[in-house]
């Protein structure tokens, strides 16, 4: 059913929960105090999102395999690195089904999403372009003509503005259909007139290595991993893993592993009941055996002691979108 709205998030995992409701699974690791705003419009066969983030961060995204995703950045602001490559102004990304990828951003950042039923996109793609049209097997970075790309951005912004200021208009059946038809026509024009940026074999291989790296972390988040063991588990050399993490994350493998474990401990502390949980037990759960060192690192990373986080009201989750 058509509809729309907007919501502000002050916790990364609450933002992740909001993204998951639109079929984007995410791990968000902010590098500063976090604040994000998510605006969405649900149309008949598509979803339109604007994701505004106020701080630099690293993210690992998993896109639902049952939808076709197209993403692009705002016209201004610092350019992010997606899949190890810096985006250029005017680029759009046509994602492969169920794609998993990393993003990192050097500062405040706005990214836009269009998610569609793949069968509908393929149908309209063939009908409107008069040529064979199919979803890519892996993500492609495209450069549409400037005028057409600007038109897509304007139409996307107009839909999000309505969803934010006049959501009842978006929920009107015929208005939603008209907006969607215009969006699909502009999107297909972008996708069928764009040139593709080349991604060599090495970049694709590095992207696969980073997905395996995340799989290893998910299995071993409860303990520290040193480089020799980490490289053995990922099945790459020390040099290759360091190069991949620098390209895709903007940091070393061990820095990223530590940040992931600290963020997991922070969420556990915040969601725990302070009457029957303690900092030492939660720190130990994520492999931090030295409590004093954990507390110092935690304070330096998040700006507060772990004992302060533990006193926060647990279980505060945002309502559904």
Image (cartoon, grey):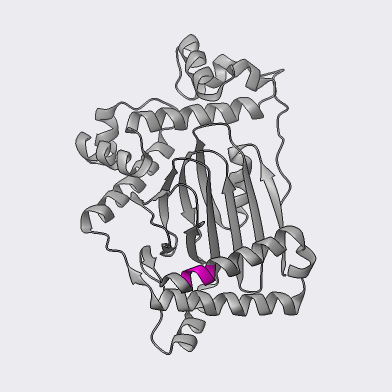
Answer left or right for 237 relative to 292: left
Q: Would residue 197 be seen by someone viewing this image from the given angle?
A: yes
Q: Closer to the camera, 25 or 305? A: 305
In the image, the segment drawn in magenta is 148-152
Residue 81 lies, with reference to residue 185, above or below; the image says above
Answer left or right for 191 relative to 276: left
In the rendered image, residue 28, in percent from the top left (x then y), is placed at 51, 41
Answer left or right for 74 relative to 17: left
Q: Would residue 120 be seen by someone viewing this image from the given angle?
A: no
In the rendered image, residue 113, in percent from the top left (x then y), is placed at 54, 61
User: For residue 47: magenta?
Assistant: no
Q: Main secondary structure of the magenta part?
A: helix
In the rendered image, residue 43, in percent from the top left (x then y), is placed at 66, 70
Answer left or right for 311 relative to 67: right
Residue 234 lies, with reference to residue 164, above or below; the image says above
Query: Measuring 72% from the left and 58% from the top, which residue is drawn there?
Result: 164
Image quarter where the C terminus lies is bottom right
Q: How many marks?
A: 0
Query: Measuring 58% from the left and 39% from the top, which residue is drawn there?
Result: 12
Query: Measuring 54% from the left and 38% from the top, which residue is drawn there?
Result: 55
Query: Measuring 39% from the left and 42% from the top, which residue is drawn there?
Result: 214
Image quarter where the N terminus lies is bottom right
In the rendered image, residue 256, in percent from the top left (x then y), is placed at 39, 33
């Amino acid at each position: 059913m058509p509809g729309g709205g907007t919501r502000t998030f002050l916790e990364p995992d609450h933002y992740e929960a909001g993204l998951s409701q639109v079929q984007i699974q995410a791990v968000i690791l902010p590098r500063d105090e976090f604040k994000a705003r998510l605006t969405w419009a649900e149309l008949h066969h598509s979803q339109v999102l604007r994701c505004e983030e106020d701080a630099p961060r690293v993210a690992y995204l998993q896109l639902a395999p049952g939808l076709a995703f197209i993403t692009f950045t705002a016209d201004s602001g610092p350019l992010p690195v997606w899949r190890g490559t810096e985006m250029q102004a005017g680029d759009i990304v046509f994602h492969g089904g169920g794609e998993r990828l990393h993003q990192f951003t050097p500062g405040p950042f706005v990214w836009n999403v269009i998610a569609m039923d793949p069968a509908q996109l393929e149908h309209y793609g063939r009908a409107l372009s008069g040529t064979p049209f199919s979803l890519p097997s892996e993500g492609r970075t495209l450069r549409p003509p400037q005028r057409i790309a600007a038109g897509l951005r304007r139409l996307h912004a107009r839909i999000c503005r309505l969803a934010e200021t006049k959501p009842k208009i978006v929920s009107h059946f015929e208005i939603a259909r008209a907006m969607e038809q215009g969006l699909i026509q502009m999107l297909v024009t972008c996708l069928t007139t764009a040139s593709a940026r080349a991604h060599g074999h090495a970049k694709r291989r590095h992207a696969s290595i980073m997905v395996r790296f995340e799989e290893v972390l998910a299995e071993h988040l409860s303990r520290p991993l040193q480089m020799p063991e980490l490289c053995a588990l990922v099945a790459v050399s020390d040099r290759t893993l360091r190069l991949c993490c620098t390209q895709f994350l903007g940091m070393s493998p061990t820095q990223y592993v530590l940040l992931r474990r600290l963020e997991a401990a922070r969420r556990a502390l915040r969601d725990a009941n302070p009457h029957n949980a303690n900092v030492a037990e939660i720190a130990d759960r994520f492999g931090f055996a030295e409590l004093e060192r954990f507390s110092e690192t935690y304070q330096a990373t998040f700006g507060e002691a772990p004992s302060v986080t533990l006193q926060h009201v647990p279980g505060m989750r945002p309502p559904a979108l």
